Amino acid sequence: MTVSVHHHYWQGEFIGDEEAGRRLTGLPAAVEAALAETLETETVLAACDALGAALCDPGHPVRARLAAHLPEGEDPAVLTELGGLLGRRELTRKLRRELGGAAPGRLNRADPRETVFEAWAPVGLVAHIAPGNAATVAPLSIVEGLLAGNVNILRTSSADTLLTQHLMAELAALDPSSALAARIVVLRFPSSRQEWLRLMCAPADAVAVWGGEAAVEGVAAHVPAGCRLVEWGHRISFAYLTADAWSDAGTLDALADDVCLHEQEACSSPQVVYLDTEDEDEVFAFAERFAAVLAARPPAAAGAPAGEPDPAEAAELTTTELVARLEEHLGLTRVFAAADGSWRVMADTRSPLTASPLHRSVWVKPLPRKQLIATLRPMRRYLQTASLAGSPTDIAELSRTVLAAGVTRVTPVGAMLESYAGEPHDGVYALQRYSRRVAVQADPVRFATTACLDDLVRPVVLPRPAGPLQGKEDVQEPARRLTRADAELYFRSGGSTGAPALSVFSYDDYDTQMHAAARGLLAAGYDPASDRTANLFYCGAMYGSFISFFSVLERLGGVQLPLSAGPDHAATVRAIVDHGADTLFGMPSYLWQLLHAEAAALRAYGGLRKVFYGGEHFTEEQQRTLKDTFGIEVVRSITYGSTDLGPLGYQCTESSGGVHHLHADLHTMEILDLAEDRPVVPGETGRLVFTTHARRGQQLGRYVIGDLGREVPGRCPCGRHAPRFELRGRTGDVMRVATYFFNHRRFLDLAEENGGHRGELQIRLDTTEARERLTVRVERTGTTDPERLRDVFLAGYPELRSAVAEKLLELAVEAVDGAALDRSPTSGKLLAVVDARG
């Protein structure tokens, strides 16, 4: 009885030859079905990051399972190397370098001042023809295809192990949505099975192939017209040394490192060393010195993949060395070689580029810099890396020259095989080769407030949050231990609800968040093409508001007066009038003071049209005053966010009060019971808990921000699918006084709705000899009547009435100037509750 070996991985399951052949005939339909479903970039990043962490953990069962499929003699350290490449930091950096952002597939405005939307879209199906000499190339190629959003089908040779198949199965298992599995097929078959290769390539939109010219030609015969052929073929690399450099022993040691690492098997390994000279004697002398350096190097490790040449390679080594020795008699060459054949240095007086037989075999040739382009350009299709050694001026000059000759990569000597995340490969970005740049032009009137077309199509689905709830204290100490790469920008909170807290960002994370806030501001009605903005947020003491909205306006291309909140209201208004500002950014409490302090001048100016506020709220009565008194047409939240999490929500033109859309491409949100870790009934008020997904270094999962809110059901009339929620105050605004719980927001609503109050309101708690005292401090206006407000509070708040009637609480209402109310010294925010009970 024959047992079928299931060595093919097809969209989530292992199958045998017969089933693989059947499914290949239906590949076009399978691709169409997979592309019909959305793949969020965050889904790829989260699964890759989890797999990378498992591969880097020596005791992880995933690593143990995969180690069993490594090629014979392969060092298990290759799994650690692969794990590092799959980490979020590396892949996010790659996305930013190659496609411009961490979510390149979203149709965002290319220029915020125009309603033109651009994105990187997948080409569709990418067929990968993997090499047989590099265990990590195949899985990383699929990951690149996934980052670009493609369906991927990969062929490994029949001599390969099942490492790629099982690695992809582990990756897909880390995605509960199954979106990754639907985009991965890995087949293992010999090159003689041409019909399978044809079925792979026929529906492909791009075919990526590794190998020499013969391998590429064999695959190209199956590539249909219009399909993109991405060649990752063999390349030749070389070193180029000036006279000062080749005289330095350190240069020779570094060059030997490049030669011996991987036994010259990498495309970036040096096969030729060029000297900036025409003197043949200098070439021979250098070759002899370099031969002594190679002779001192330990031999290749036993069992290493490139350690022992196969019979064909051994024959080539022998032939090349023999021909070079014969040409010694003509004065053309000189050979220095190990007795056991483990290395050889072949000095040649002729400059044209010559391929090496590898295995520590190096040509040394003269090439004056004036002849560089003429000598190298005929081989431009095959050139890859040039390592240069010389003075800074030499390096700068020679870099330009070798790049003009066709080289795609320049490194220092000793660093030829090193790389960085997002580095171009053979002169191109892989992710761009697997993507298309697409654009949508939209009507500028109907789409004036649309920042991202995808928001109108579908909700963003991110991985579900998991783990325990976290508060500020849980993230403060870890933030101080972040690495330099993750801790580049430091902010402190305004301290309006407690001691200022530290928040740390990488610049990449900060950039992502500022772009999100910019999209939210467009949705709220900001027009970067016409609005002229006075930025009046507070600045200094590591407080982030002013800096952040400076950055937002910079990304929007909006006109900005970076004034900041200052005590000289007259000077601020003069700048607003002199420079024609029509839009104000700032804290409600500061803007309220500014507008009323300079009311006459601003009414005479008559140019204010929009106010975007953050950090606090303008009440409905206050907004009515802004519109009636100052002629302001739009009063809207600039963003809802926090110093530690960044922008969390935004208003659209259909939003009012505390209603916001979630920045669903950055965060997921839960609304939990006030006392327990369980969701509230939809529509009820609970604690807002956020998990941020687009953050490097810090794990801000299930973060209890301290705000209260409720879900707003249904789709917004603006058309966006992003969830909506309504802010209902802060947990700190709920006070326990005289055995009762009171809410600051309830006092504010009663003062507005029943008392006609339009100013600010603050509650102060004190202890007297007899009982506790609750004082409602209201901003004095022309119609403020403290006694009437006291009656309003008692009539509309039954718990308050009971506490006063039972003589458990003393209630007072006093009218004060707005400047007398207590505020945060850093941000200028009004302190909603001042608890002075000790």
Image (cartoon, rainbow, N blue to C red):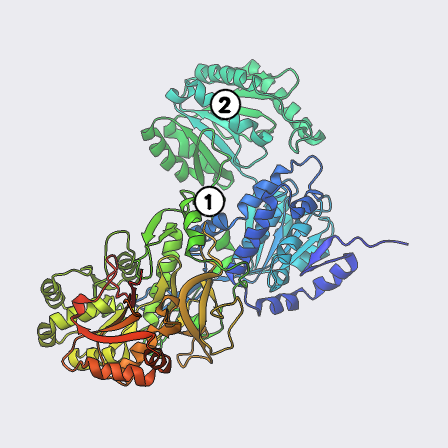
10 Å crowding of disc 2: few (<14), some (14-19), many (20+):
many
Image quarter of residue 60: top right
Instruction: Tell me the quadrant of the picture where the C terminus can be found.
Output: bottom left
In the displayed structure, would residue 586 be above or below residue 426? Answer: below
Image quarter of residue 620: bottom left
Q: Is residue 684 visible?
A: yes
Point out the tag, 2 or 1, that comes first from the N-terminus.
Answer: 2
Nearer to us: label 2 or label 1: 1
- Name the residue beneath numbered marker 2: 364
Foreground pick, 625 / 221: 625
In the displayed structure, would residue 364 be above or below residue 823? Answer: above
Q: Secondary structure at mark 1?
A: loop
> Residue 538: where, in percent of width, then height?
23, 59
* For the residues bearing labels 2 and 1, Cβ distance under 8 angstroms: no
Separation of disc 2 and disc 1 at Cα?
28 Å
Q: Is residue 416 left or right of residue 575?
A: right
Residue visible at 69% across and 34% down in the picture: 73
Q: Is residue 627 left or right of residue 212?
A: left
Q: Secondary structure at mark 2?
A: strand
> Residue 440: where, in percent of width, then height?
41, 70
Q: Is residue 385 left or right of residue 600?
A: right
- Name the residue beneath numbered marker 1: 423
Foreground pick, 103 / 266: 103
Residue visible at 22% across and 79% down in the picture: 758
Type of residue at label 2? Val
Type of residue at label 1? Glu
In the displayed structure, would residue 65 be above or below residue 115? Answer: above
Residue visible at 50% across and 51% down in the picture: 88
